[in-house]
Image (tube, rainbow, N blue to C red):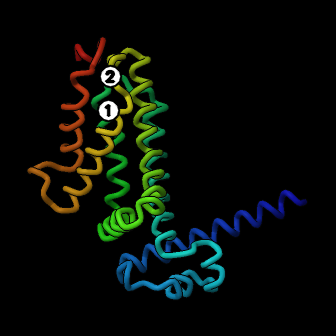
Amino acid sequence: MEVNIFSIRDKKKLQTSTAILQSAKRLFTHNGYEQTTMEQIAEDAIVSIGTLYNYYASKGDILVAIMAEHAIESLNRGHDLLTAKPEDPVKALSEMVARYTEVFLSLDSRLLGKSLSLALENPSTMGQRLFSIDLQMITQVQESIIQMQEQGHLSPSLHVQDIAYLLYSMGFMAILLSYAGVLPSLSTEEYITRQVDHIIKPWLAGEAKKG
């Protein structure tokens, strides 16, 4: 019986947190981050202001949680590729980075911009928290590269961490270029595939290199 009680409590907490984040995302998008108040978020989510502060101490905390939600969705999409054990490194890594960018492009550009602003203003707190989100996706890229090295598709001399950071940074640049509407006559996916090809092709091995 005790387990069921805790299970119900956990479910209620998750529902409340989800309602808060959905309301905040909607209000941030429609009204702007700066114009939205904690009181408005509480009212929209149908929770008391005290409950809201029990979950999130500030709008910045809420924005980080929204970014984390999108990161989880990105990781889930990347995990599907990882478990498929792909044989074409360029295609697989292009798709992985494209899935990351697709999720974040679904965000209002002002929210991404505000999260970057908060990270720069508070590098030791907000910056570290947002980087920890990025690091999860970078780690997944590293795992994919290692897997393809072990399968003989990528050269063992490839420096995994360097390439993973480079690929992730390129994906982030694709997001910024897409938001700005300045991709050179390419779709975001085409841009990513071209860049991944440039980065990965020198490190192809075995049958992948022949292909």
Callouts 1 and 2 close, C-beta under 8 Å: yes
Q: Which residue is mark 2?
A: 158
Crowding at label 2, few (<14), some or many (≥20) Cα neighbours within 10 Å?
some
Q: Position of residue 28 (x, y in %)?
A: 40, 77
Q: Residue at x 44, y 73 (%)?
A: 25
Q: Position of residue 148 (x, y in %)?
A: 39, 23
Q: Is residue 47 left or right of residue 114?
A: right
Q: Position of residue 145 (x, y in %)?
A: 39, 28
Q: Residue at x 14, y 53 (%)?
A: 183
The disc, 1 or 2, on the residue closer to the chain's N-terminal end is 2
Q: Is residue 70 visible?
A: no
**Looking at the picture, does residue 56 appear above or below residue 129?**
below
Q: Is residue 176 left or right of residue 22?
A: left
Q: Is residue 162 visible?
A: yes
Q: Position of residue 94 (x, y in %)?
A: 29, 37
Q: Which residue is mark 1?
A: 163
Q: Residue at x 43, y 44 (%)?
A: 137
The amino acid marked with disc number 1 is Ile
